[in-house]
Image (cartoon, rainbow, N blue to C red):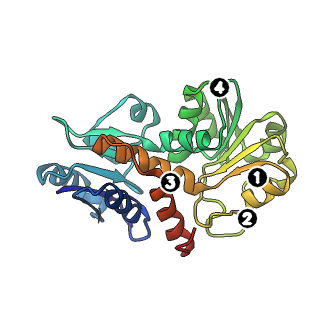
Amino acid sequence: MNVFGLVGNPVGHSVSPSMHEAAYDELDLDARYVTFEPDPTELETAISGADALGIDGLNVTIPFKQAVRELVEPDDLASRIGAVNTIDFTGDRPVGLNTDAEGARRALVRHEVTLDGRTVVVVGAGGAARAIAFMATDEGATVHVANRTRDTAIELADAVDGTGHGLDALPALLPDADVLVNATSVGMEEDVSPVPSEALHADLVVMDAVYSPLETTLLREAAAAGATTIDGAWMLLYQGVAAFERWTGLAAPVERMNRTVRAELTGNEDV
């Protein structure tokens, strides 16, 4: 049996176990996906223990994405982003990857959105924002970063040859933007948006990394403005797909995984 899992604290809310186990069931794989909640002070012990026990792969979530980078061999993209969210234990030394970047890229591709030559505005400057900003730059986009703390936005923007701004710059940035991505948690707990609704327009593609709720205030207001909208479950899905394919070497059963994610998030088995 192959064992994969998720390490974070907390992890009880995660839909990853259901998503991955649905994939194992679809392909009739002898595998399980389990969750681990180590004390933050015991992360090194947890990773070395997983390696010693023969665990094949781990996803990594808050608060360990940055710290775990020092305990594995990060690939080039994970090194540049500064965060690891997937570990592959099948080689001589655990390899750290960042499938958040690939998840965002595939979510856009799913909706027939290309980034080469486009202008992308990323709201936020944390881990998800970094993954998206580096991915967009690698795909040929010009990236502008807007964040509550302007200095943090400038730091990320400098790393991707973009421009950094405070959130107050969004009304000036969005008229010429092709793609807007909210990479903050704004909209998860409260019915609010990080973006002024009057700055949204019909030529914009708006993707929200928030997946609970599926329809955030930002996406609702973007749809009302005529924009193309992409909910956060797509990025969640495709980062999991990328991890699954890395670990197993198999093509992921994307549609089965997607149905499972959406059923988990909505409580509706018929989605």
- The residue where tag 2 is placed is 192
In the structure shown, which secondary structural element does the residue marked by tag 4 occupy?
loop
Q: Position of residue 124 (x, y in %)?
A: 62, 47
Q: Earlier in the sequence, mark 4 or mark 1?
A: 4
Q: Earlier in the sequence, mark 4 or mark 3?
A: 4
Is label 1 in contact with label 2 (beta carbons under 8 Å)? no
- The residue where tag 1 is placed is 195
Q: Quadrant of the N terminus?
A: bottom left
In the structure shown, which secondary structural element does the residue marked by tag 1 occupy?
loop
Q: Is residue 40 visible?
A: yes
- The residue where tag 3 is placed is 236
Q: Above or below — where is 207 with respect to 6?
A: above
In the structure shown, which secondary structural element does the residue marked by tag 2 occupy?
loop
Q: Earlier in the sequence, mark 3 or mark 2?
A: 2
Position of residue 106 in the picture relative to residue 117 (left or right): left
**Mark 4 residue type:** Asp
Q: Quadrant of the C terminus?
A: bottom right
Crowd rating for badge 4 (residues with CA inside 10 Å; few <14, some 14–19, many 20+)? few
Mark 3 or 2: the one toward you: 3
Is label 1 in contact with label 3 (beta carbons under 8 Å)? no
Crowd rating for badge 3 (residues with CA inside 10 Å; few <14, some 14–19, many 20+)? many
**Mark 1 residue type:** Val
Mark 2 or 4: the one toward you: 4
**Mark 3 residue type:** Leu
- The residue where tag 4 is placed is 116
- Tell me how far mark 1 sits from mark 2, CA to CA: 9 Å
Crowd rating for badge 1 (residues with CA inside 10 Å; few <14, some 14–19, many 20+)? many
- Tell me how far mark 2 sits from mark 4, CA to CA: 31 Å
Nearest the eye: 138 or 1: 1
- Tell me how far mark 3 sits from mark 2, CA to CA: 21 Å
